[in-house]
């Protein structure tokens, strides 16, 4: 089937699903038999604070934002077991991938999911009240087991945030890539360098394959020009699973 008739979406199996041994259930619900979709990429990720903050950037400033970051990093469900703090990130591919996964996932709020679509994945989740230091309820956090991209545009942004091109087989890559010839880019302390600095991380070297939009963002950022996304959005995936200190 031609790519123009397919799309891709990102799914994150979150720490609460892992803690409650629901990984197999989620994967079975999203299997090719049920969804008509297939895997294009899969990885286990120790979620760094940078990656968590970029993934939930739209919620910055909201009352539940700090708790949401702790949640996706696994610190709420595995506070004393850092080695278990992870998510499973998956790229699904197929016709209407975004819509099909959203339908199987169900409403974002688990209470709504149980009422409106019993048996969907998120119907097994829960809503956790958030309180202030005096014990007053000030908001809520939805522990809803999985994340699923809401639109094809969001799916592209999220797949590029969580996956490098090399994490996805070449024939399953939907987005333009660039085969780098001669550029070097290093990252350290929110600054971009073209030469190695002690303690810096190389995010682009000659011979690398990178999302075209990420290369453009690096080039514009280094030139001091407005870029289509933040530097952190580009480099977050390169700092995942590197050292325990980044988690």
Image (spheres, rainbow, N blue to C red):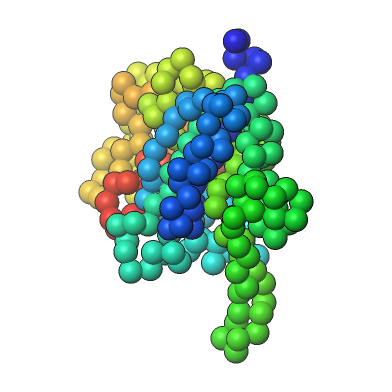
On the image, the x and y values in percent for residue 40 come to 47, 26
Q: Residue furthest left?
A: 198
Q: Residue furthest front?
A: 119
Query: Does residue 98 lie above or below 111 as drawn?
Result: above
Quadrant assignment, res 182: top left
Q: The N terminus lies in which quarter of the figure?
A: top right
Q: Is residue 143 visible?
A: yes
Of residues 190 and 137, the one nearer the viewer is 137
Q: Is 86 left or right of 101, judged from the image as shown?
A: left
Of residues 38 and 164, the one nearer the viewer is 38
Number of marks drawn: 0
On the image, the x and y values in percent for residue 123 come to 64, 53
Query: Does residue 126 lie above or below 30 as drawn?
Result: below
Query: Does residue 42 lie above or below 23 as drawn?
Result: above
Q: The C terminus lies in which quarter of the figure?
A: bottom left
Q: Is 102 left or right of 214, judged from the image as shown?
A: right
Q: Residue at x 33, y 69 (%)?
A: 80
Q: Is residue 213 visible?
A: no
Q: Residue at x 51, y 37 (%)?
A: 28
On the image, the x and y values in percent for residue 204 come to 35, 32
Q: Residue furthest right?
A: 116
Q: Residue at x 38, y 68 (%)?
A: 79
Of residues 130 and 191, the one nearer the viewer is 130
Of residues 236 and 108, the one nearer the viewer is 108
Q: Residue at x 56, y 26 (%)?
A: 33
Q: Is 180 left or right of 63, judged from the image as shown?
A: left
Q: Residue furthest bottom?
A: 134
């Amino acid at each position: 089937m031609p790519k123009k008739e397919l799309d891709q979406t990102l799914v994150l199996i979150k720490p609460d699903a892992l803690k409650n041994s629901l990984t197999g259930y989620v994967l079975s619900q999203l299997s090719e038999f049920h969804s008509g979709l297939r895997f294009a990429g899969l990885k286990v990720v120790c979620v760094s604070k940078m990656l968590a903050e970029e993934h939930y950037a739209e919620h910055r400033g909201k009352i539940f934002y700090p708790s949401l970051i702790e949640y996706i990093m696994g610190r709420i469900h595995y506070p004393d077991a850092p080695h278990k703090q992870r998510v499973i990130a998956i790229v699904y591919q197929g016709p209407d991938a975004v819509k099909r996964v959203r339908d199987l996932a169900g409403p974002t709020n688990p209470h709504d999911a149980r009422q409106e679509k019993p048996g969907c994945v998120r119907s097994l989740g829960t809503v956790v009240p958030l309180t202030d230091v005096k014990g007053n309820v000030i908001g809520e956090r939805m522990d809803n087991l999985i994340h699923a991209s809401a639109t094809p545009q969001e799916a592209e942004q999220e797949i590029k945030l969580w996956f490098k091109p090399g994490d996805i087989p070449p024939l399953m890559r939907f987005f333009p890539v660039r085969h780098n010839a001669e550029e070097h880019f290093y990252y350290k302390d929110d600054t971009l360098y073209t030469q190695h600095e002690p303690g810096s991380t190389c995010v682009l070297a000659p011979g690398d394959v990178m999302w075209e939009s990420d290369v453009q963002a690096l080039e514009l950022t280094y030139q001091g020009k407005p870029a289509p996304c933040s530097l952190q959005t580009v480099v977050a995936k390169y700092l995942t699973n590197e050292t325990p200190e980044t988690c």
